[in-house]
């Protein structure tokens, strides 16, 4: 196996060395491709030092040296990759020693186009654990049982709660097959959830097999500045970001000729349900702003207007 590990780097000077070294522990890793995305910290200098220290590390930036987000950065990494297989790793996460144990066996079968495993969690600081332990606890992010490849896409679409999840950090793909079957890789217009949208489409086009599901093969690092942690913890409205995600999925499904009509209809219903949920959130905030302007005195004094209470809650 010749694996290209693609690492988008943004604001990760404290973590990227650990990520790179966790990938280099494997002889199967042909190269680690760093795509530095105009980080505001010292990440670029750290990346340069890593290329000088390790001959398997490659460093790229976008042609304009600008900030484009994780999706376009992964696309650039895929474009530059020379390995037969692609694996992904976020710059603040890391691989465990068993990361490719299942892959080494499963990919002996040419019908296996991708393999996914389980993701663990690590809190870099006590403050991060205090803030986010209720969200992640010490649980695995995993698919709950081994499914055949034909069940992976409908499992994610129809029964996400009981099917479980797999993460991009625990995914390995045959590069040639992915490039042949997927006209679009990561969506460039999604700043968040672009990996979720990619995994949905990937599982539709490729035969993905379960690897190690009952123990972590990679670890998600949780810290105060992690963008996805902020979204998942609802410091950013998750409903609005998911509307954009399901809008993309709905648009893709509508144009996909191989997609059964009943699946397209289900995806459209999911899109509408997130639109409604988001509208509800916006309505509540609109009501709060309205009463702050028109009835601020009673709100401030604690004598909440009964209409405010009834209409908002």
Image (cartoon, helix red, strand yellow):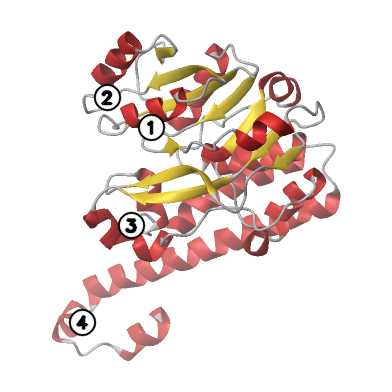
Counting residues from the start of the chain, the first of labels 4 and 3 encountered is 3
Query: Which is nearer the eye, 275 or 134?
Result: 134
The image shows residue 310 at horizontal and vertical percentages of: 40, 87
Q: Secondary structure at mark 1?
A: loop
Question: Which is in the foreground here, disc 3 or disc 2?
Answer: 2
Query: Which is nearer the eye, 195 or 125?
Result: 125
Which quadrant of the figure contains the N terminus? Answer: top right
Q: Are marks 2 and 1 in contact (CB under 8 Å)?
A: yes
Question: Which is in the foreground here, disc 3 or disc 1?
Answer: 1
The image shows residue 9 at horizontal and vertical percentages of: 37, 27
Crowd around label 4: few <14 · some 14–19 · many ≥20 (10 Å): some
Crowd around label 3: few <14 · some 14–19 · many ≥20 (10 Å): few
Q: Which residue is mark 1?
A: 91
Counting residues from the start of the chain, the first of labels 2 and 4 encountered is 2
Could you say which disc has been placed on residue 43 in the image?
2
Residue at coordinates 41% horizontally, 20% vertically from top-left?
A: 35
Q: Which residue is mark 4?
A: 299
């Amino acid at each position: 196996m010749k694996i290209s590990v693609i690492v988008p780097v943004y604001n990760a000077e404290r973590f990227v060395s650990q990520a790179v070294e966790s990938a280099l522990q494997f002889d199967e890793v042909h190269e680690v491709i760093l795509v530095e995305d105009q980080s505001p910290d010292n990440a670029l200098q750290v990346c340069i030092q890593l290329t000088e220290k390790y001959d398997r590390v490659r460093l790229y930036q976008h042609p304009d040296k600008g900030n484009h987000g994780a999706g376009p950065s992964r696309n650039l990494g895929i474009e530059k990759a020379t390995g037969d297989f692609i694996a992904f790793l976020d710059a603040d996460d890391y691989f465990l020693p068993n990361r490719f144990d299942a892959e080494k066996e499963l990919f002996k079968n040419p019908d296996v186009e991708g393999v996914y495993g389980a993701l663990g969690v690590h809190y870099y600081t006590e403050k991060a654990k205090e803030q986010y332990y209720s969200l992640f606890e010490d649980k695995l992010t995993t698919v709950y049982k081994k499914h055949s490849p034909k069940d992976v896409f409908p499992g994610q679409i129809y029964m996400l709660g009981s099917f479980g999840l797999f993460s991009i950090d625990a995914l390995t793909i045959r590069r040639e097959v992915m490039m042949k079957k997927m006209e679009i890789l990561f969506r460039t217009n999604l700043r968040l959830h672009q990996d979720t949208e990619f995994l949905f489409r990937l599982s539709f086009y490729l035969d993905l097999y379960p690897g190690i599901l009952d123990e972590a093969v990679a670890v998600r690092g949780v810290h105060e500045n992690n963008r996805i942690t902020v979204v998942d913890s609802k410091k950013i409205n998750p409903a609005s970001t998911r509307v954009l995600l399901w809008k993309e999925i709905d648009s893709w499904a509508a144009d996909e000729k191989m997609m059964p009509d009943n699946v397209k209809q289900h995806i459209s219903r999911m899109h509408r349900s997130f639109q409604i949920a988001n509208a509800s959130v916006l309505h509540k905030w609109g009501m709060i702003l309205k009463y702050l302007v028109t009835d601020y005195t009673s709100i401030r004094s604690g004598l909440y207007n009964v209409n405010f209470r009834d209409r908002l809650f």
